[in-house]
Image (cartoon, rainbow, N blue to C red):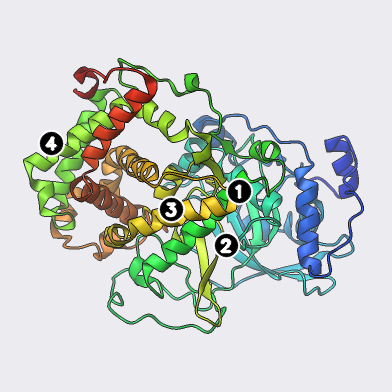
């Protein structure tokens, strides 16, 4: 095998004692009769992980990634080096021996067993997802064990290559440390989450390089057929699967591919996500103060930290935002005109959009304070619970259930903000028809699982709309990126959302389709939900809360 690129074997108990300053043993605890051996192993593993010291993430820059992404460095969770590409995993330098060590350290495979062989799983490629690369492989164990999966899934960083460099920097730098939060969810909370997640086998991340790896079981999708990007099946009756056969996988902004009423799926997502929030609030995942240290936590952030300014603009400088809005309006009303409502070409509507966004931008910091000032509205849960981040099945009674993956946005933030990011990829018509049901579901579920905390439905609605408008700032800044994916001149012949130039995944990502659809949703919210009036009401509300006058017009004009 030659010189190992990773550290040679060490007994996991010795490593734990050296790194943590104490033994890894738990108090004597008997396995409950109703718990399987696999479940008991997960239960014990998560309890051990929660006893470990909390790793401290140090902020990194683009230079960190650019200069170090090819370096082999130890991870901050288990203290060993690790592969971060498919080729590395299958190489002689890593392979079965490294997997054995990794699974032993993570406590996911008994110490008397080992990985004997790694096999490539055919030519099947995973092309969905915007925040990382993915691949599949199979293993053989020295001792066959029904409690261990042989088909495994790996999530890794995007490569620093032409097509994906911006995605890599976005996830590793702009969204840092989202990968650490995803790893922490699996290693700490798998035993206590109220939903299924793919079984965790190993995961680690290097703060020095930004490289990371997550290894889980494969989700056994029943029929992972190619997605209908062209919308040819959107009027067909949904196919029926047998009970417990897993649907999908699905992708963002393609509600017509769901095997049922989209509202049923979004209600199921809201319920599970809110159950997580309520249980976290009630301390069911462990000491909330300890658990919170492993994730983003906006609960209890002092007012001074938000950068409030009663007389100044707390968002982008108005003279920088104004041209972005102008470019966006040109896109809606001229370049991609067939994709947007006719009113987007009306000067009155355009002024309404412009003034609404400029006003909210003036109160950008104050809106974040509004989202997070009341700790009852701030809870730990998934940050992006869309249909492509879940897997669905039905039981014998045809009732829908789901498991969840892609926990990179796990953290304690405003539930109104979270709700937008759970629903933003759905079609506006179903959102419009079911918004009250969605809000009621969050209010009722949170009350049930948080030991009685009551959210105000209309406060949630305001937060939801403000979060949507806030995302529009980023979307407007991405018009140039849209033109790189589909040249501006080509939009002259794009007639609808199903055109492959805008409807299919580009470089394996749904970015183009998502940008176009979410812009449409926000535009329709401005017109059909009177989002401009919501911003006016927010301005009155926040000024009353902070005992300040409304900001001068100069903060909202270029």
Of helix, strand and loop, which one carries label 3? helix
Image vertical order of residue 17 relative to residue 525, above or below: above
**Direction left: furthest residue:** 347
On the image, the x and y values in percent for residue 290 come to 70, 37
Q: Quadrant of residue 496?
A: bottom left
Q: Quadrant of residue 354?
A: top left
Does residue 10 show up? no
Judge from the rendering whether residue 447 lies leftward or rightward of residue 555; answer left or right: right
- How far apart marks 4 and 1 lie (CA) works out to 45 Å
On the image, the x and y values in percent for residue 282 come to 64, 46
- How far apart marks 3 and 4 lie (CA) works out to 29 Å
On the image, the x and y values in percent for residue 520 come to 24, 52
Q: Upstream in the sequence, badge 4 or badge 1?
A: 4
Instruction: Identify the disc placed on residue 468.
Output: none
- Disc 4 target residue: 351
**As rendered, which of 449 and 150 lies closer to the eye?**
449
Instruction: Identify the disc placed on residue 135.
Output: 2
Of helix, strand and loop, which one carries label 2? strand
- Disc 3 target residue: 422
Q: Upstream in the sequence, badge 3 or badge 2?
A: 2
């Amino acid at each position: 095998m030659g010189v190992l690129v990773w550290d040679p074997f060490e007994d996991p108990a010795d490593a734990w004692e050296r790194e943590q300053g104490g033994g890894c043993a738990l108090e004597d605890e008997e396995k409950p009769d109703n718990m399987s051996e696999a479940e008991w192993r997960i239960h014990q593993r998560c309890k051990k992980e929660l006893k470990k010291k909390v790793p401290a993430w140090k902020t990194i820059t683009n230079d960190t990634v650019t200069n170090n992404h090819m370096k082999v460095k130890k991870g901050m969770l288990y203290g060993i080096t690790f592969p971060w590409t498919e080729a590395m995993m299958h190489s002689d330098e890593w392979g079965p021996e490294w997997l054995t060590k990794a699974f032993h350290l993570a406590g996911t495979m008994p110490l008397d067993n080992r990985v004997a062989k790694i096999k490539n799983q055919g030519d099947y490629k995973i092309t969905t997802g915007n925040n990382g690369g993915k691949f599949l492989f199979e293993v053989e164990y020295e001792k066959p064990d029904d409690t261990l999966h042989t088909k495994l899934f790996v999530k890794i960083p995007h490569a620093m290559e032409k097509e994906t460099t911006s995605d890599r920097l976005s996830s590793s730098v702009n969204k840092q440390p989202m990968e650490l939060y995803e790893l922490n969810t699996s290693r700490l909370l798998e035993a206590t989450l109220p939903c299924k997640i793919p079984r965790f086998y190993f995961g680690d991340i290097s703060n020095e390089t930004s490289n990371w790896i997550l290894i889980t079981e494969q989700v056994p999708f029943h029929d992972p057929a190619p997605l209908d990007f062209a919308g040819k099946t959107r009027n067909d009756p949904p196919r029926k699967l047998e009970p417990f056969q897993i649907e999908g996988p699905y992708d963002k902004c393609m509600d017509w591919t769901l095997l049922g009423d989209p509202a049923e799926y979004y209600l199921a997502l809201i319920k599970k996500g809110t159950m997580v929030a309520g249980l976290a609030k009630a301390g069911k995942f462990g000491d909330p103060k300890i658990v919170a240290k492993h994730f983003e936590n906006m609960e209890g952030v002092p007012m001074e930290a938000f950068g409030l300014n009663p007389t100044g603009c707390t968002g982008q400088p108005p003279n920088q935002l104004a041209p972005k809005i102008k470019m966006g309006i040109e896109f809606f009303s001229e370049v991609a005109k067939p994709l947007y409502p006719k009113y987007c070409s009306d000067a009155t509507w355009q002024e309404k959009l412009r003034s609404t966004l400029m006003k909210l931008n003036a109160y950008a910091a104050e809106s974040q304070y509004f989202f997070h000032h009341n700790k009852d509205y701030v809870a730990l849960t998934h940050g992006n619970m869309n249909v492509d981040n879940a897997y669905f099945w039905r039981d014998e009674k045809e009732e829908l259930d789901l498991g969840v993956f892609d926990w990179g946005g796990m953290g304690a933030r405003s539930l109104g903000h979270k709700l937008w990011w759970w629903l933003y990829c759905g079609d506006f018509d179903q959102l419009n028809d079911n918004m009250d049901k969605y809000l009621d579901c969050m209010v009722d579920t949170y009350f049930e699982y948080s030991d009685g905390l009551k959210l105000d439905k209309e406060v949630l609605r305001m937060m939801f709309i403000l979060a949507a408008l806030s995302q529009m700032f980023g979307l407007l800044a991405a018009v140039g990126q849209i033109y790189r994916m589909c040249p501006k001149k080509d939009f002259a012949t794009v007639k609808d959302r199903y055109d492959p130039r805008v409807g299919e995944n580009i470089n394996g990502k749904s970015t183009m389709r998502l940008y176009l659809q979410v812009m449409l949703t926000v535009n329709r919210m401005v017109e059909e939900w009177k989002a401009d009036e919501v911003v006016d009401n927010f301005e009155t509300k926040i000024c009353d809360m902070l005992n300040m006058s409304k900001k001068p017009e100069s903060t909202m004009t270029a």
